[in-house]
Image (tube, rainbow, N blue to C red):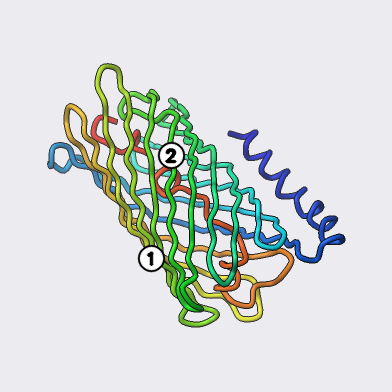
Amino acid sequence: MILNRLGAVCLIVALPLVVNSAQADDNNCTVAGLVQGGGLLDQETQTANSTFADGIDWTSGFGEAALNYGCDVWRVQIDTALYSFSENETPYQKLTNGHVGGAAFWRDSDLGAIGVAGSHVNQHESFLTVATSASQWRMGGFAELYLNESLTFGGGAHYLTGDAFWYGTFETQPMTGFEGELYAKFYPTDNLALNVRGDFTHQRIDVGTFIVNVDGLAVSGDVEYLIPQTALSVFAGARFATQDIKSFSDSKQTDTQEYVGLRFAFGSNAPASLRDRDRHGTYDNTSVFQEKIPSLVSSLPGS
């Protein structure tokens, strides 16, 4: 996980040097980057066979970075993210989720975008003196439609494979599945954006002689404001997520989140508006269920 982070940092530092060299020969080539960070609160509840079992309050600091380079309508991207959750009740628990990934896509700023993306997701769990890690590969595609100057529609689908935590044991088990997202972004003014997003997932975890099926649904909404004459924006939002876990006994996890943060865009051209930044900038390659929501190992009855 540390090596993955170090590799991403090295690429982010090195790519602008390559871009500057390329731009000397081709004025149609540009670089676009976005960094963001903030804080998140998560109120989580769990039930077992429809009976309330427990509740956990999490706090999280998070950071994300993406950088892409392209000529005309073609672009390639590298990206990374890190979400660190802490639960300060007894017993003390910590979670760290993140990824290193990339994307390649075609985009016309007047029409839309279509492309492929992939990432390697890492999850780390510590519980008192015990710690373990899990990881998954996430691979898929996405598309966006720029309906008009004020409205963007988008969506994607991704295949998951790797291992997952099995709650209560701090062991990992083989996992396969998929996840997808649909979203709409509305720009009332150049400096204001409203975003609504829905995410869904289905995962199959093979635990010894039985199979665990996890079905999840999340709804997110946020508002973002671009500070005039700058490339810095502030955002705030909320998310509600539910995951149904079906095995020899049924369990459920629900998470209600509130988050705030800052975003800073950089590259060849300073964004004149949030719409301009989004339609010329980076692609969001971070998984909601695998990174932004606490993992099941720490949250279900029996952990």
Left or right: residue 39 versus residue 105 is left
Q: Quadrant of residue 209?
A: top left
Spatial CA distance of label 2 from label 1 is 23 Å
- Mark 2 nearby-residue class (10 Å; few <14, some 14–19, many ≥20): some
Q: Indicate the position of residue 266 as horizontal and vertical percent values.
A: 69, 64
Q: Secondary structure at mark 1?
A: strand
Left or right: residue 219 versus residue 117 is left
The amino acid type, in three-letter code, at marker 1 is Val
Quarter of the image with the N terminus is top right
* Image point (75%, 50%), residue name: 15
Residue 294 appearing in the image: no
Q: Indicate the position of residue 32 as horizontal and vertical percent values.
A: 67, 61
Q: Looking at this view, is 34 or 113 the one in front?
A: 113
Q: Which residue is mark 1?
A: 196
Q: Which residue is mark 2?
A: 159
Q: Indicate the position of residue 202 as horizontal and vertical percent values.
A: 32, 40
Q: Count all numbered tags in the image, as a single digit.
A: 2
**Which of the two discs, 2 and 1, labels the residue nearer the N terminus?**
2
Q: Secondary structure at mark 2?
A: strand
Left or right: residue 182 versus residue 21 is left
Q: Quadrant of residue 229?
A: bottom right
Quarter of the image with the C terminus is top left
The amino acid type, in three-letter code, at marker 2 is Tyr
- Mark 1 nearby-residue class (10 Å; few <14, some 14–19, many ≥20): some
* Image point (38%, 40%), residue name: 178
Q: Is disc 2 in contact with disc 1, using a CB cutoff of under 8 Å?
A: no
Marks 2 and 1: which is nearer the front?
Answer: 2
